[in-house]
Image: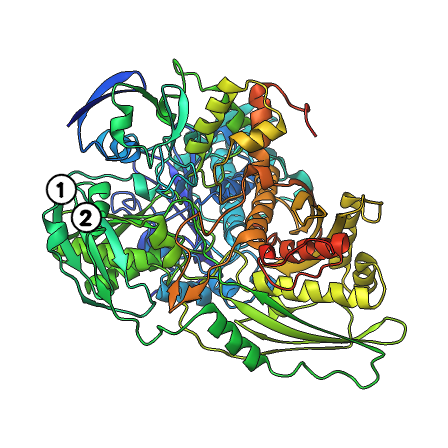
Amino acid sequence: MNKWTRRAFIGAGTVAGGGFLLGVAGFAFAPSRHSLVSDDAAEKGQLTTWITITPDNVITILIPHCEMGQGTPTALAMMAAEELEADWSLVRVQEAPALDAYANGYIIRAAGGEYVPAALGRGVDYGAYRIAEWFGFQVTGGSTAVRSTGEYGMRVAGAAAKEMLLAAAAGQWAVSATECTAKGSRITHAPSGRSSTFGELARAAAAVSVPTSPALKHPDSFTIRRTSLARLDIPAKVDGSAVYAIDFTTPGMLYAALEMAPVQGGTLISVDTTPAESMPGVKKVVKLNAAVAVVADSFWRARRALAALRPDFSDAGHGDVSTASIFAAFDKALGAPPELPKNAAKVVTADYRAPFLAHATMEPMVCTAKVDGGRAEVWTGVQDPLNARSTAAKALGIGPANVHLTNFLLGGGFGRRLPFNFDYVDLSVRVAEAMSPTPVKTIWTRENDIQHDYYRGAAMSRHAGALDANGTPLAAHSNYTGGGNSEAVFMPYAIAEQNTEEKEVKHPIRPGQWRSVLNSQHGFFKESFIDEMAHAAGRDPFEFRRGLLGNQPRFKAALEKAAVLSGWGLPLPRGEGRGIAICESFGTIVAEVVHVAVSADGQLKVPHVYAAVDCGDVVNLDSATAQVEGGIIFALSAALLSEITIAQGRIVERNFRDYPMIHVADAPKITTAFIRSDAPLGGLGEPCVPPLAPALANAIHAATGIRVRELPISKTPLKRA
Amino acid sequence: MAITITVNGTARTLDVEPEMPLLWALREVLGLTGTKFGCGISACGACTVHLDGRAVRSCVLPISAADGKTVTTIEGLAQDGTLHKVQQAWIAHQVPQCGYCQSGMIMAVAELLTRTPAPTDEEIDAGVTNICRCGTFARVRAAIHAAAGTEGATS
């Protein structure tokens, strides 16, 4: 390995046909720019960089993240185009291939709960790059794309490219680069009136030495960022031409339908394959360790034949596990409520419960694979192509370099398609191996999807709080089960004694990351409890919180903004109420106010949700707003209706009939305000989820006096006495 | 069994089991993959197409029920290269996120507007029951009103 140098942070080269490419090390380059970026990089399939400018003046930006509806590719391209002074109409995006060179290192830090240290500035540290390479991650998750890849990569790549184009123009015209300006994909030398497009200068620019510290634009001069630009992926999503993994086809391809061991950890004991084998279109019944697959010439025929089988699976000794047994274990582990100061004038205690949840992406899990000798082709939709590639390689006992993976648009992610959750890739390549060399597309049914997810963990917490005679909080403690971390349990409030303690409970339901991860449960717990403390103190819940945020100006500003947006304090008709909650996650602070109306017979409506969001700054205003709306609806659907239950070790729910979702009729109006703070960019895919459930429960309390302490809310009767 | 359907203006003859759902005939036999599989039980609407002009959920509709009939899928909604007004509104309001449910959502809305050209919010609530997991509902409603020319007509 060559020595890591500052100069190697950014690399450039030419592409076939004359042009210019540029990237930032750590995301796009190996430590030596010469090893991966060279004149024949394109021919070698190693166009391992981010920005390509071709003679037709088109700028192509490679994005080391997937598109699952969050608008990341467009936002990242905006960040590069801004620094580059590009004509946005000439910018194209492309998802980076699943190659080691595109490992996006900063997710490692985010996954570890760390923020990117400011000292790293514009470079990318070698350590993070190496870790990412070793782990083989190319993740889209943790709400990291814009705040890491964008802020520490795309901006730098764009700024460096601009400086190189300026230098190339200055050289050609024998003028000073400082007299040249870049604007609208064109370099102009005003004194002489000369002007060339980026495309005309691209080849010369590629020969310019790479600036080590390109100057970044001041936000006040942004013309692309902070605006609302149409997402580049949307046109194909309204005419049926967008291609998801389920849409991929390849000649001779067969289809597989799966039945998996209903109890996690169970294995296939036996199956009589003959009833399926004689059915039309069936090619083979494939027995796997914990599943049986029928391969046929159409998915429908595969599925029909699968239904004729009666496989016998073991239950791995988990046949007596149920929702009740898990919550009983939670209750026992939590023990006595945490101890409180002796001088408390008033004590508040409460238990909260959050259920298991499935992701239920609209596109079920799908993976097509072709295994031929020691090589494999995989076509799928994942939030991490590199880790998925490793999963396929491991299942086949071959090296990752022998697996070529193509990633498609994702029909929803929400954490289901993150690294280590690639059972669908594993099973698919095993089926394809049994049919080698015929390619096989394995499609999960909705029932497979709901019953074999990596679930948002069920959790329970036991809180105890103390107030003095003036209603000032002295202590707020909690014990919890189901997982947590310092971010999830953090309360910004000035309460002298705060302690949280995890009580570990093991159970066999496999956990996953569900949009906002542990914040989804803890947001409900802690922001419900502070509301209960406010009521115990006889204080308005907004004012109570605000009074405890004197040392947290960003929290205070977001809380106040949400209150103002919602008309907090204005009178409401009987049966209506407002609830407020505030949470920080993934570097973004979100305060939400939910307005509810509860009829006398207990029918709940949510007419309006207000969100004040401090994510530092906004890149694409409209798609950022869409993420706020999406997070709120995702959280609302779960809070109102969603619960995965377990009986005899098996997931009970099967499809959208018993794991229902809200519809357009149930969707509130959503009013969003972004707060521009001087904080580093925060994430947006997840942070609007955590405050919703507590704000909703708090609103129900305000409307009815009924305190919801268990999700989903549908479990609590809201009929007024 | 040979079944003949007119799909997006072209007569197609398929030799498949009569009970094969229209969805899978469209996707796997005719290669029209814009129509999506979401649940298989007519609960989510991702598979919505028009059968003789009426919105149907094709995942549970046996193809025999479409024999001799006209089917329009998302690929056939634009006319003469011009996007349908619902598709145009979907772009203007930047409705899709992941986009997977949107073929079905757009087909459901296009049919709603033929039946109810100026729908109220209540008519939208009753007429559009597709599931979207990304949570695009507020934009769906706004885009329907835009396509119908009823912006600002409701609360």
User: Where A246 falls versus A677 (above or below)?
Assistant: above
Of pointers 1 and 2, the one earlier in the residue sequence: 1
Q: Nearer the viewer, residue A126 or A112?
A: A112
Q: Secondary structure at mark 1?
A: loop
State the residue lying farthest toward the front: A721
Picture mark count: 2
- Image spot of residue A485 (x, y percent): 57, 71
User: Where A74 falls versus A333 (above or below)?
Assistant: above
Cβ–Cβ under 8 Å for marks 1 and 2:
yes
Q: Secondary structure at mark 2?
A: helix
Q: Which residue sits at x=30%, y=74%? A: A316
Q: Nearer the viewer, residue A580 or A681?
A: A580
User: Where A189 falls versus A69 (above or below)?
Assistant: above
Residue under numbered circle 1: A281
Label 2: few (<14), some or many (≥20) within 10 Å? many
Q: Quadrant of the N terminus of chain A?
A: bottom left
- Image spot of residue B113 (x, y percent): 51, 21
Residue A718 circle label: none
Label 1: few (<14), some or many (≥20) within 10 Å? some
Residue under numbered circle 2: A305
Chain identifier of the residue bearing label 2 in the image: A
Residue type at tag 2: Ala
- Which numbered disc, 1 or 2, marks the residue closer to the eye? 2
**Is A470 left, or right, of B99 in this rendering?**
right
Q: Which residue sits at x=48%, y=40%? A: B131
- Image spot of residue A449 (x, y percent): 37, 53
How many angstroms separate mark 1 from mark 2 (CA)?
9 Å
Residue type at tag 1: Gly
Residue A546: image quadrant is: bottom right
Q: Is residue A216 visible to the viewer in this orientation of the structure?
A: no
Chain identifier of the residue bearing label 1 in the image: A
- Image spot of residue B108 (x, y percent): 46, 28
